[in-house]
C-alpha cells in the first residue's frame, strides 16, 4: 500500500463518511449458499467497493468493485482469535468470495489512480477496522 505524506487528514475524512450500509448489491455473492439465514449478512460499502459478511454456520466474505472511484477494492479479514486471515481483492467489475467462520472485523480499501499520464501515481483509501 502506497502512503503519501500529508494525506492523513483527507483519508480520515473519507473514512468517517465512506462506510455505509449498502441497500442492494448489483451482483450476487458467488459463495453465498442457500443456507444464508435472515439477519446474518451484513453489508458495507466504500464508494464503489461493496462487501458482504455472513457469520452464520455457512459463513463467507464477499467483495465486489463496481464502476466508480476505485479501480481495485480489497478487504482484510480478522477472525475472533485475532488472526489476520489475509486480504481479498476484486478489480473493477469483478467479485470474489471466500468462506470464513467467525469473522471479527474487516477493513475495506479502495485503490485509485491520481493521474492519467505515466507513471500513474496511485492512492489507497481504507476504512478503520469495522467490527462485524
Image: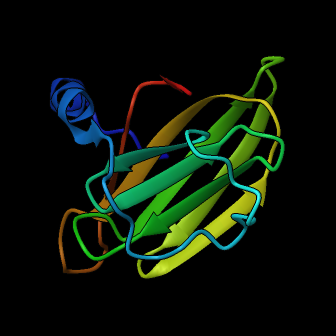
Where does residue 15 sit, x and y in percent of width and height? Answer: 27, 31
Q: Quadrant of residue 70?
A: bottom left
Q: Residue furthest top?
A: 81
Q: Quadrant of the C terminus?
A: top right
Residue in view at x 61 percent, y 41 percent: 76
Q: Decide which of 121, 106 is in the foreground and name it.
A: 106
Asked whether, in this view, residue 129 is left or right of residue 40, the answer is left
Where does residue 130 sit, x and y in percent of width and height? Answer: 48, 26
Asked whether, in this view, residue 36 is left or right of residue 114, the answer is right
Q: How many marks?
A: 0
Asked whether, in this view, residue 128 is left or right of residue 59, the answer is left
Q: Decide which of 66, 41 is in the foreground and name it.
A: 41
Where does residue 115 sit, x and y in percent of width and height? Answer: 17, 70
Colour scheme in use? rainbow
In the rendered view, would you say 80 is above or below 5? above
Where does residue 90 sit, x and y in percent of width and height? Answer: 54, 69
Q: Quadrant of residue 11?
A: top left
Residue in view at x 44 percent, y 46 percent: 43
In the rendered view, would you say 111 is above or below 28? above
Q: Quadrant of residue 69?
A: bottom left
Asked whether, in this view, residue 34 is left or right of residue 130, the answer is right
In the rendered view, would you say 18 is above or below 52? above
Residue in view at x 60 percent, y 58 percent: 62
Q: Decide which of 35, 114 is in the foreground and name it.
A: 35
Amino acid at each position: 500500500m502506497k502512503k503519501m505524506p500529508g494525506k492523513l487528514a483527507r483519508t480520515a475524512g473519507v473514512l468517517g463518511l465512506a462506510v455505509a450500509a449498502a441497500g442492494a448489491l448489483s451482483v450476487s455473492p458467488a459463495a453465498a449458499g442457500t443456507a444464508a439465514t435472515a439477519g446474518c449478512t451484513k453489508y458495507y460499502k466504500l464508494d464503489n467497493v461493496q462487501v458482504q459478511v455472513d457469520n452464520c454456520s455457512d459463513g463467507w466474505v464477499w467483495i465486489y468493485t463496481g464502476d466508480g472511484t476505485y479501480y481495485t477494492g480489497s478487504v482484510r479479514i480478522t477472525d475472533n482469535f485475532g488472526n489476520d486471515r489475509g486480504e481479498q481483492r476484486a478489480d473493477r467489475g469483478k467479485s470474489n468470495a471466500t468462506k470464513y467462520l467467525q469473522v471479527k472485523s474487516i477493513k475495506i480499501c479502495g485503490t485509485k489512480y491520481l493521474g492519467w499520464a505515466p507513471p500513474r501515481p496511485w492512492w489507497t483509501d481504507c476504512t478503520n477496522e469495522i467490527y462485524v
